[in-house]
Image (spheres, grey):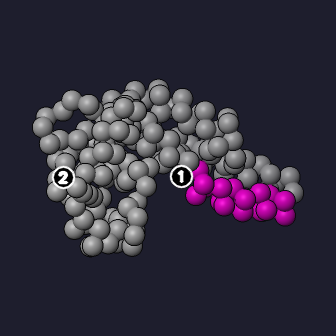
């Protein structure tokens, strides 16, 4: 069996760090990421026992390599932090936020489709109601975005980002 690809490992590291509050001990991160891939059936106990030619654990080496070659150079993890601590950067929070905003908007799209169907059935009155409900959904989305915990990213960035998603048709703007 092949190890998970670097991108999948990198994403798992980012999500784990986010869940742990933005920084954590390497050991805790690696344990959670490993558990995730085992529970997903992507990683086996046999793979965890593999050693590279130098005698190092291959899986642990892979986790360290992803950090060093993918996450730190792209500015997603702090290059310098206390020994054994991995820490998210503001850029990582922005990336995670973007994905969450897109996921959230995808959850809202079926609601918007139902509202459109109701509006079609109800004629002009339904259209006014639909617009009101869409605005309420957008307001709720805006409140959720405004209350996000994106570390050092200023609030106006979050608002700008939601507006961008809405205008570009990638986010709640599909409503």
Q: Which residue is more in the foreground, 72 or 127?
A: 72
On whether residue 105 falls in the magenta region, the answer is yes
Q: Is residue 91 visible?
A: yes
- Element marked by disc 2: loop
Answer yes or no: is residue 173 visible: no
> Depth-wise, is mark 1 or mark 2 nearer the camera?
2
Q: Position of residue 38 (x, y in %)?
A: 32, 70
Q: At numbered mark 1, what does the secondary structure look like: helix, strand or loop?
A: helix
Residue 138 rendering spot, x and y as whole percentages: 60, 44
How dense is the environment of label 1, judged by Cα within 10 Å: few (below 14), some, or many (20 and up)?
Answer: some
Disc 2: which residue: 54
- Dominant secondary structure (helix, strand or loop) of the stretch shown in magenta: helix
Q: Is residue 87 above or below residue 175?
A: above
Separation of residues labelled 1 and 2 (CA atoms): 45 Å
Kindly identify the residue that appears in the image at 47 percent across and 33 percent down: 158
Image point (26%, 31%), residue name = 79
Res. 48 mark: none
Q: Residues within 10 Å of mark 2 (few under 14, many from 20)?
A: few
- For the view shown, which residue lies furthest in the left direction? 83
| 160 is higher (above) or lower (below) than 130 | above
Identify which residue is drawn at 73% across, 52% down. 130
Q: Nearer the viewer, residue 119 or 3?
A: 3
Residue 104, which numbered label?
A: 1
Q: Hey, which quadrant is residue 172 in on the image?
A: top right
Residue 52 image point, x, y percent: 24, 57
Please report the residue visible at 48 percent of the width from the left and 48 percent of the height from the top.
100
Q: Which residues are magenta?
A: 103-121
Is 172 on the left or on the right of 152, as rendered?
Answer: right
Q: Quadrant of the N terminus?
A: bottom left
């Amino acid at each position: 069996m092949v190890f998970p690809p670097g991108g999948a490992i990198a994403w798992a590291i980012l999500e784990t760090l986010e869940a742990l509050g933005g920084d954590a001990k390497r050991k805790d991160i690696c344990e959670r990421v490993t558990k995730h891939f085992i529970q997903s059936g992507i990683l086996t106990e046999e793979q965890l026992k593999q050693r590279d030619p130098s005698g190092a654990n291959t899986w642990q080496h892979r986790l360290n390599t992803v950090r060093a070659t993918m996450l730190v150079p792209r500015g997603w993890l702090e290059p310098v932090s206390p020994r054994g601590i991995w820490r998210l950067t503001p850029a990582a929070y922005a990336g995670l936020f973007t994905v969450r905003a897109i996921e959230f908007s995808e959850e809202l799209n079926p609601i918007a489709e139902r509202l459109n169907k109701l509006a079609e059935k109800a004629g002009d009155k339904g259209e006014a109601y639909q617009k009101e409900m869409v605005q309420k959904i957008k307001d709720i989305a805006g409140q959720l975005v405004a209350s996000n915990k994106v570390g050092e990213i200023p609030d106006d960035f979050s608002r700008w980002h939601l507006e961008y998603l809405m205008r570009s048709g990638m986010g709640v703007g599909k409503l």
